[in-house]
Amino acid sequence: MSSLERDGVRIHCEIAGSGPALLLTHGFTGSSADYAENVAALARANTVITWDIRGHGQSDSPADPSAYSVPLCVADMAALLDRAGVERAVLAGHSLGGFLSLEFHLAQRARVAGLILIDTGPGYRSAAPRAGWNERAERIAVDFEKKGTAQARGLALAARGVLAQHDGRVLESLPSIALPTLIIAGENDTAFLAGSRYMAEKIPGAKLAVVANAGHSPQAEQPEAFTRVVSEFLSALGSA
């Protein structure tokens, strides 16, 4: 168990194993514990970095709304790579974590060795559906605020500052991704299957793996199948 401090905000992280680096980022309301069933096997051949997004898990939940943004999370991810002593890593992200991984690729693509996008959406090109998404994020924030706990307030602020979307840059960047990319989706995750297939079509050379008998979180619902698919992808990268 470890942590790093970023401008007074403590970010929880854990590092296991050795070898090529793999940074695992969880989804909204999740935590690094979402990968508990996968880390040991993946760490046999890789340096595996897990962490809690600010406002989540064991990371701090600052009261200042300005402490929550996509650029800050991307900077947290870079600091995590620095903490692990690695220049480049494969970025694997679930749901919001996948979107943040795509944002990181836009900001610091030289530090990205590959992408694994797990039940992730690429955002929206036009304003109307983006506004609908942001209205949903605001409703989620209000619901968390009603709970009154510090953790719930952190999730509310993360919904407004990190989950909400402001442009179509990520979606528009997909054809320019020139890195090995694996897209994973649970076969029962109807809300994200279409987006997963879209990304597989738009990212040159991307592979799509649909995990049987899994919904939105195949890493937890079918950990053996998920770990096998990821390990095969990482092994192929190592031998390329």
Image: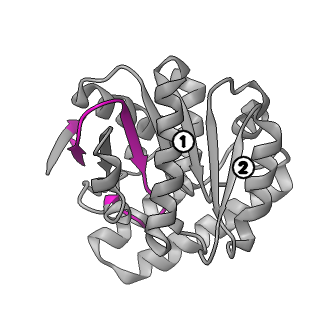
- Of 218 and 61, nearer the camera is 218
Residue 6 quadrant: top left
Quarter holding residue 23: top left
Quarter location, residue 121: bottom right
Q: Which residue is rendered at x = 32% and y = 49% of the image?
A: 50
At 23% from the left edge and 41% from the top edge, which residue is drawn?
A: 17
Q: Mark 1: which amino acid?
A: Phe
Left or right of residue 73, residue 171 in this image: right
How far apart are the two marked residues, 2 and 1, measured between alpha carbons? Answer: 25 Å
> Under tag 1, what secondary structure?
helix
- Magenta residue span: 5-32
Dot 2 alpha-carbon crowd within 10 angstroms: few under 14, some 14 to 19, many 20 or more: many
Farthest front residue in view: 239
Q: Quadrant of the C terminus?
A: top right
On residue 233, the disc is: 1
Q: Is residue 200 above or below residue 209?
A: above
Q: Is residue 110 visible?
A: yes
- Asked if residue 111 lies in the magenta stretch, the reply is no
Q: Which residue is mark 2?
A: 123
